[in-house]
Image (cartoon, rainbow, N blue to C red):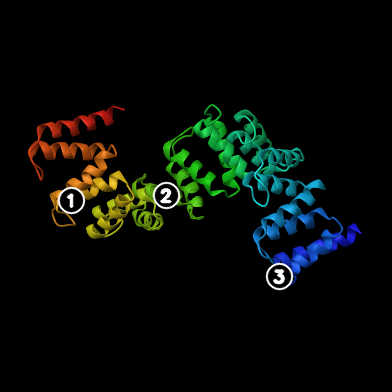
Amino acid sequence: MTGLAQSHYRLGMSYLHGKGVAKSYVEAMKWFKLAAQHQYPRALFMLGRMYDLGQGTAENAAEAARYFLQAAELGYARAQNALGQAYIKGRGVDQDYGQALIWLRKAADQGFSDAQYNLGLMYAKGHGVLKDFLEARRWWALAAEQGNPKVQFTLGHMYLVGKGVQKNYSKARQWLRQAAEQGLPAAQFHLGMMYVKGTGVLQSDSEALRWLQRAAEQNYLDALYHLGKLLGGGSGEVRDPLTAVVLLKQAATRGHQRAQVLLGQHLAKGIGVAPDLSLAYHWWCEAAKAGNADAQYNLGVMYLNGKGVNKNAVEGKRWLTEAADRGHTRAQYCLGVMYSTGTGVPRDIDEALRWKEAAEFWESI
């Protein structure tokens, strides 16, 4: 009977992925149900997934959890992990960290790396257990050694920033590189930034370029920005202002504030593109409205000097004040100068001193 169940399951997988037959979720579900009648755990799990995702049927989290439970009780690790996740999220079942721990541990003890990662997360967050980074790291190390890139990245980032462990750039590089080589864009980005800054490695623009490019090719937003920044201002071996502008525009269009600010600077100065103050103004407005102090400062200076916009001291003061209130020291100094000279505002020495002292305070910390 097991052979028949396996045949039904394999046919279901063929319909699910469209291998050798026309893809059909309805047909896949039909064959999985036939296999599930024989308590075939993989088929039970796949039915749970299909109900969870709404494939071939209406989405039904409770029905998904029911199938996950049947497969989990038969010892199937993937189902145990899925059931544990359902209890963590309260999806199809009442949220219950205790039950989540039970099922995740069953899967983790079988060496299922996703469950080891999720169990580690519970210890890291203190969900249902006392927060324990050592225990979290133990489970993550087991998963990482199996080649799970998500866990390798998690460990690498922990060592990079010193969260739950002492900073160890050698171990950070080791784990990040393993995840990066498997194509995980977050790992590629952070590894690239280690080379940008020379953090625990010999600073190398060419090595930074290699890893940032791989992350940017997967549209990783921060990689688009930092790659654009590197190409626009890096060493001669990687410098490419034309490509920098293209990358910065991609990130800016997706709302990346620092990319909007830097793109505006390229446009204002004509770096890699024809000078265009009106377009620089547009991108700085986008970032300034979202609360970016550098963009607010740039707008303030534009209005004070009347470059790219009509000269307007009131509007200039408004944007400089927005930036100054966020601790932007150059904006604070500008306001201090405005009040000390009476430029665009009534001359007020006390107000001038207040802003200059604020700038000195922020520079000292």
Marks 1, 3: nearer the viewer: 1
Residue located farthest toward the bottom when viewing the structure as drawn? 22
Residue 243 at x, y percent in the picture: 38, 56
Residue 285 appears at what percent x and percent y? 28, 54
What kind of element bears circle 1? helix
Q: Give x and y (percent) for residue 293.
A: 29, 44
The residue pinned by badge 3 equals 24
Query: On the picture, is 310 further left or further right than 61?
Result: left
Front position among marks 2 and 3:
3
Can residue 239 be spotted in the picture? no
Amino acid type indicated by mark 3: Ser
Amino acid marked by disc 1: Glu
Residue 116 versus residue 11 in the image, above or below: above
Residue drawn at point x = 76 percent, y = 40 percent: 106
Residue 149 falls in which quadrant of the image? top right
* Up-down relation of residue 313 to residue 131 (above or below): below
- First-in-chain label (2 vs 3): 3
